[in-house]
Image (cartoon, rainbow, N blue to C red):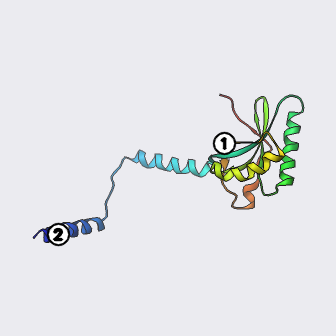
Amino acid sequence: MKKFIIFSILSMLAISSMAQVEVIADGRLQTILEQHITFNEIARSSPGYRIKIGVFTGAGSKQNAFDLRDEIATAFPDLRAYVFFEEPNFTVKCGDYSSKLDAYGLYMHLKVLYPSAAIIRDYINFPVLSQDDLVIPEYYEEESE
């Protein structure tokens, strides 16, 4: 008898799970969901790690930063290097890694060439999927709070 009751309950659950469920929700929920999807399509970065190579300040710092970026781009053609302006410093960073462990191999190699290199948390670009994704601005200016 117990087996029959358990079988009956399982049968009813299986039949009810096949039925479609209609969700009735406020229209504002759909609007918020659409805005969330649009924002995620626009966002081009996510939290991750980069290797900071150098920080320059003072006279000629911008030129020094771009020279270092070009040096890295020449030595490592597959590595993306960036110059960021965070007042009053120009910072050279490279790589887009989702974990610290991913960045560690290159970090050990760069540490020999640039003793001040360090792995830092940063917002990274998504992986390159096509050549159009490689276009980056000359430098970034972060807004101060």
Residue closest to the eye, 106 or 66: 106
Across and down, in percent, residue 10 comes to 22, 67
Quadrant of image for the N terminus: bottom left
Q: Secondary structure at mark 2?
A: helix
Residue at image point 19% right, 66% down: 9
Which of the 4 image quarters holds residue 68? top right
Vertical position of residue 4 compared to residue 104: above or below: below
Residue at image point 44% right, 49% down: 30
Q: Earlier in the sequence, mark 1 or mark 2?
A: 2
Please name the amino acid that badge 1 sits on.
Answer: Asp
Q: Secondary structure at mark 1?
A: strand
Q: Is 14 situated left or right of 4 in this image?
A: right
Identify the disc placed on residue 122.
Answer: 1
Q: Is 113 situated left or right of 143 in this image?
A: right
Q: Report the residue marked by disc 2.
A: 8
Quadrant of image for the C terminus: top right
Residue at image point 77% right, 35% down: 85
Which of the 4 image quarters holds residue 64? top right
Residue closest to the eye, 114 or 27: 114
